[in-house]
Amino acid sequence: MQTAGQIPASDVRRPADTMQTRPLSPALGAEIMGVDLSEPISDELFAKIQDCWHQHLVVLFRDQHLSEDDQVRFAERFGKLAMSHTRRFTTANPAVMLISNIRQDGKPIGALPDGEMQFHSDQCYQEIPAKGSMLYAIEVPSNGGDTLFANAYKAYETLPEDIKRRLDGRKAMHAYDYDVAGTKRGTLIKEGVPHYAHPAVRTHPATGRQALYVNRLMTVAIEGLPEAESDELLNFLFAHQENPDFIYAHKWRPNDLLLWDNRCVLHARTDFSSDERRLLRRVTVLGERPM
């Protein structure tokens, strides 16, 4: 989306050799330095950023001073953006959603306001899940509210061979029902609850690598298995993919921008005090049907 007076990204000649990277953890993640996202970036620089994203799964840009338009402009380089159908937590731009526990007249101004959240992949319950999620920090608590990222490539690659065989060709059912999915599994899904089945192991369209595509928050069953066997297998998979060796824990600072790849990364949130304010802006990049 180009606004009046904005310089097209293809006309920018900012050199790509200013970009530097450093790993965030042995598990996944890289910090990208030497890039100012408040200005349009060249195609050459974007290609380097995208390659880094595909290689490291999560990329971090610190000390970015971004307007909503800046964040949206950068996110659009990765693909079409999701637009909110309910404007309750969006801003003037329907592609921007607020994530916040700040309340006005007793009501949160943003989604997902309080507490911890179990590992999940954004929009896995839809036919076309999210490709990428981009979160920009404005206010963060002094303790907690960290985001944990788990490497789904490593989770699959380190599975025992017999488990890989059991998953071969299977689909997992995901449901958007936070009150039930994390505590009661099975194929009985309440009427009106969004749900969809995707391959339990998906292949990344850009890297060709396979990733374990189930999660504790929203996966309710492995299709084609008896309920007890499905539950047993899922519990094993959840514990396996949440191995600390596969995880990077991000401690937020104001003006951090994080982009993660939902096709090969799970994320979770740690608890934080309700007495402290937390305000972030999220933009979601649409993806493709998992294969």
Image (cartoon, helix red, strand yellow):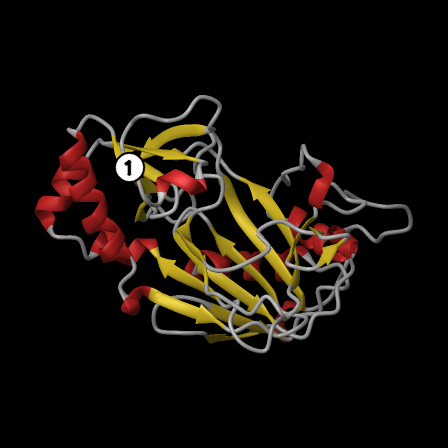
Can residue 273 be seen in the rendering of this structure? yes
Mark 1 sits on what residue? 185
Q: Who's the residue at 32% across and 49% down the image?
A: 209
The amino acid sitting under disc 1 is: Arg
Instruction: Point out the image quarter for the N terminus.
Output: top right
Q: Using the rendered view, name the quadrant where residue 87 is placed.
A: top right
| Residue 208 spot, x, y in % from top left | 34, 46
Quick one: which residue is furthest to the left in this view? 162
Quick one: which residue is furthest to the front in this view? 106
Q: Who's the residue at 42% across and 61% down the image?
A: 149
| Residue 17 spot, x, y in % from top left | 62, 72
| Residue 141 spot, x, y in % from top left | 60, 73
Q: How many marks?
A: 1
**Secondary structure of residue under mark 1:** loop
Give whichever of 137, 20 is nearer the camera. Answer: 137
Q: Who's the residue at 31% across and 25% down the image?
A: 188
Q: Is residue 100 above or below residue 77?
A: below
Q: Residues within 10 Å of mark 1 (few under 14, many from 20)?
A: some
102 relative to 244 in the view: left or right: right
